[in-house]
Image (cartoon, rainbow, N blue to C red):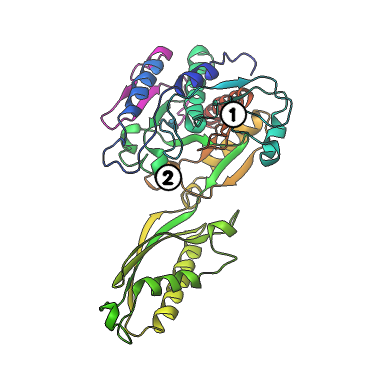
Amino acid sequence: MSDINYTCVDRFLKYVKYDTQSDPESESFPSTEKQKILGRELVKDLLEIGLQDASMDEWGYVTATLPGNTDVNAPTIGLISHMDTSPDVSGKDVKPIIHKNYRGGDIKPGNSGVVIKAEENPDLQKQIGNDIITSDGTTLLGADDKAGIAEIFDAVNYFVQHPEIKHGPIKVAVTPDEEIGKGADHFDVKKFGADYAYTVDGETVGEVEDETFCADSVNLTVHGVNVHPGYAKDRMVNSIKVASQIIEALPKNSLSPETTEKREGYIHPHSISGNEEKTVIKFLIRAFTVDGLKKKENLLMEFCDDVVSRHPKASYDFEVIEFYRNMKYKLDEDPRVVDYALEAVKRSGVQPVRHAIRGGTDGARLSYMGLLTPNIFAGGHNFHSRQEYISIQDMKKAVDVIINLVKIWEEKSH
């Protein structure tokens, strides 16, 4: 689409300079008020593009509508990104650097000592000749997901500038607090008004993500018997030691994040606290199917039974908390939502790749809230790190895909 007037790079370079880190310890929503500072700027940009109802609500959600211009009854398509950056690495005073015409080898952003090593980043081989954007190495870049914001805005701007291109209604949303798993907490699906939606928050060019983990957590409380340690012989049952034995019983070469990949799930103890009388271990349980999830929970309970049976005075409580489910269960109810995304990637001259996320997304939650929402690539790499990078060419390709996607939904409605 050589006639597209791209401005996504300028937008992106402006947005990354806003510090929008979310805070998992905060009890407010959004978790940081500074996200709203960017939100107000995004509203201005949407108004300038021509989306007259652009606004930000009390929760920090930025929304806007581009009315359809077709005679057919095309569905309303939502395009969603998020404004916050990861709490893991600073997003303050981001200084983006453009490395033009990348010729291979390591990339050294600024004088920070950070190195993006070619041998550790094989996708760099696909960037030969491209213009790569990094931070100066002292912060993350913020391509996750300010690239998605810029790409969505430019795709919408393209339709405004080319009224001869027919399309159905388009809804835009930029959410806060996605990085801490709360991006959909106050999202009003009915008010948003989309029939189908896409988050533009993936990584490598060509990827369409239509699966997530199924996720539960387990709060395991081990009860022991505490007495004065000077008189503890044959009387004390130290819950810390019993809990440690349960962790030690977990498989060493499988079922952990350190030893699994692709479609393998895991049992992951991520927090432990307690004393002789009571110790609490918090586990993350992950699998791509509900059946696989339940099998892992039952297996963990078997480990608990075995260990506790060796300590007659000990006992345990096993609480399962449901987090989210694989969005594929919902997306399969209407295969068009993924099929059209794959077709849009192909029309943009890229080989489409269906990809499963070893994690969750707002799209998974939205899909179970009634809005089918797979994820498509934004083009960035090494998210949540000071080695984060994205190429200008990949950002432009993402804009192509979004435009083609909206056009396909209109074409298929005839």
In percent of width and height, residue 402 lies at 54, 28
Q: Is residue 152 above or below residue 360?
A: above
In percent of width and height, residue 408 lies at 56, 30
Q: Main secondary structure of the magenta part?
A: loop
Which mark is drawn over residue 390? 1
Q: Amino acid at mark 2?
A: Ser
* Comes first in the chain, label 2 or label 1: 2
Q: Say which element carries label 1.
A: strand
Q: Is residue 31 above or below residue 96?
A: below
Q: Determine the residue positioned at 40% across, 73% down.
A: 241
Q: Assess whether residue 394 is covered by the magenta stretch.
A: no
Give the camera-side residue of 389 and 108.
108
Q: Is residue 45 above or below residue 123?
A: above
Direction from residue 177 to residue 413 in the image, left or right: right
Q: Determine the residue positioned at 30% across, 39% down.
A: 186
Q: Is residue 158 visible?
A: yes
Question: Counting other residues with Cα less than 10 Å from the Cα at mark 1, is it few (<14), some (14-19), or many (20 or more)?
Answer: many
Question: Counting other residues with Cα less than 10 Å from the Cα at mark 2, is it few (<14), some (14-19), or many (20 or more)?
Answer: many
Give the camera-side residue of 237 and 40.
237
Region in magenta: 47-75
Give the camera-side residue of 327 and 71.
327
Which mark is drawn over residue 62? none
CB-based contact (under 8 Å), mark 2 and mark 1: no
In percent of width and height, residue 155 lies at 52, 22
